[in-house]
Image: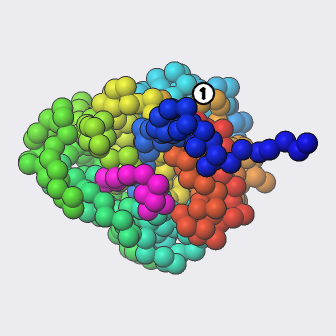
């Protein structure tokens, strides 16, 4: 006699016949859905082409000091392993790394190779294979995909939503007073405009070097009232109103940490956003890179520290991705800075992260390993990194990742094993 395979309808009928509640049969599925509903992802975009060799200096690479010259970070770097360390301003990130809650991706890039801020940021935020091929962002399309199965809200920090969160799905934005780093982006735009001008390009670089050296190492937010836009709302619990910029590095870090805590406050509220994006400007380091990155990386570190501490118990459900549009040249230039490059370093942080070493392969800084004899050669496609987190942490299926979220990207495999 053939064995009968019970149908779902038959099982339900049998259960009803024995007086069992049909709701009990749905408990495992409901529990799985509830677990997914707790998952959160935050994307931090560091605009300007953040120098990966400063974020995570490969101090154990034999070519590092010779290439970097005066920009090399030696005894001051915070060690991670036998090859890599972190910039001395990334103290909070280093503590998270030692706790197994932060990892580096030291040779990552988008598909774009033009080294233009405009084009590279477009590809980074749209998730497309080519420049200006779509007008929506991959994080918005992620929310659209997830919203077909459960309620997912998204939030951006700043006066307007960045491209990464623009699209069909309405998202919220929140701005602390005058906005986030509103003055830091202008130099980036000007340097992109004049990068091929033999006269204006070097002149702008020299001017920025003089300006940077004259400034205190400050990084702050504009004070004033905060407002929730697009979907209404209010201020997150624990937000410190009027946290404005003040002279001195310590005040800058405190203001930046408040920004991170404010973002965390929104996300830890019951029914708060599941997805968030924030842009930090000012990482274009053509001149006086050491001073500039001391300031900007201290700011980034404080924001991440604020997110970490502000989320509290929700940190264990969270993954934070920190990415930039491209890296910098391996060699320093004549103004104490570096020029537009290719491979950079991304950071993956969160209580949901699996402990481990570097993500991806390290190509080394040997002469024959440099991309076009000048840049860190990428070994990880940025889309693969994003795909891996979205698949494992947020439950987005591979077909949606390959076609809807990152169009025409089936050849790019997700980086798995992160969460």
* Depth check, front residue: 151 or 382: 151
The quarter holding residue 248 reads: top left
Q: Nearer the viewer, residue 313 or 157?
A: 313
Q: Residue at x 18, y 34 (%)?
A: 237
Left or right of 176? Residue 45 is right
User: Which region is colored magenta?
Assistant: 144-156
- Up/down of 324 relative to 242, above or below: below
Residue 289, given in percent of the width and then of the height, sits at: 43, 47
Image quarter of the C terminus:
top right
Task: Give percent across and percent down for residue 259.
Answer: 25, 40
Give the structural element (helix, strand or loop) at label 1: loop
Residue 212 visible somewhere in the drawing: yes
* Residue beneath the point at 17% across and 56% down: 232
Percent x, y for residue 249? 25, 34
Mark 1 residue crowding within 10 angstroms, few (<14) / some (14–19) / many (20+) = some
Instruction: Name the residue beneath numbered marker 1.
Output: 355
Q: Residue at x 88, y 44 (%)?
A: 2
Q: Which quadrant does the N terminus fall into?
A: top right
Instruction: Assess whether residue 146 is covered by the magenta stretch.
Output: yes
Total numbered circles: 1
Q: Is residue 163 magenta?
A: no
Q: With 401 as the anchor, is 155 left or right in this view? A: left
């Amino acid at each position: 006699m053939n064995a009968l395979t019970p149908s779902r309808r038959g099982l339900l009928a049998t259960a009803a016949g024995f007086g069992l509640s049909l709701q009990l049969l749905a408990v495992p599925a409901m529990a799985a859905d509830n677990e997914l509903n707790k998952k959160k992802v935050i994307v931090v975009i560091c605009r300007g082409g953040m120098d990966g060799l400063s974020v995570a200096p490969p101090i154990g690479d034999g070519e590092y000091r010779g290439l970097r010259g005066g920009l090399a970070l030696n005894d001051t770097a915070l060690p991670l392993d036998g090859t890599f360390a972190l910039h001395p301003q990334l103290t909070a990130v280093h503590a998270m790394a030692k706790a197994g809650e932060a990892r580096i991706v030291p040779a990552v890039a988008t598909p774009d190779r033009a080294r233009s801020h405009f084009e590279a940021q477009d590809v980074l935020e749209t998730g497309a294979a080519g420049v200006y091929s779509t007008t929506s962002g991959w994080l918005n399309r992620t929310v659209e995909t997830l919203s077909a199965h459960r309620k997912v809200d998204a939030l951006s920090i700043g006066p307007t939503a960045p491209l990464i969160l623009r699209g069909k799905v309405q998202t919220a934005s929140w701005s602390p007073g005058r906005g986030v780093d509103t003055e830091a982006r202008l130099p980036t735009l000007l340097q992109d405009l004049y990068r091929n001008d033999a006269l204006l390009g070097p002149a702008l670089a020299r001017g920025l070097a003089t300006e940077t050296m004259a400034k205190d190492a400050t990084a702050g937010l504009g004070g004033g009232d905060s407002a929730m836009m697009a979907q209404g709302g209010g201020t997150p619990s624990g937000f410190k109103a009027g946290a404005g910029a003040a002279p001195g590095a310590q005040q800058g870090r405190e203001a930046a940490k408040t920004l991170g805590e404010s973002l965390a406050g929104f996300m830890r509220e019951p029914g708060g956003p599941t997805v968030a994006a924030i842009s930090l400007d000012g990482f274009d380091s053509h001149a006086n890179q050491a001073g500039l990155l001391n300031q900007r990386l201290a700011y980034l570190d404080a924001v991440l520290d604020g997110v970490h501490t502000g989320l509290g118990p929700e940190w264990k459900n969270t993954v934070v991705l920190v990415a930039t549009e491209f890296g910098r040249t391996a060699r320093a230039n004549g103004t104490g800075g570096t020029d537009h490059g290719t491979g950079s370093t991304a950071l993956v942080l969160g209580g949901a992260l699996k402990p481990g070493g570097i993500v991806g392969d390290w190509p080394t800084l040997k002469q024959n390993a440099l991309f076009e004899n000048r840049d860190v050669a990428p070994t990880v496609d940025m889309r693969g990194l994003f795909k891996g987190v979205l698949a494992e942490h947020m439950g987005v299926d591979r077909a949606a990742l390959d076609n809807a979220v990152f169009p025409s990207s089936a050849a790019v495999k997700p980086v798995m094993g992160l969460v």
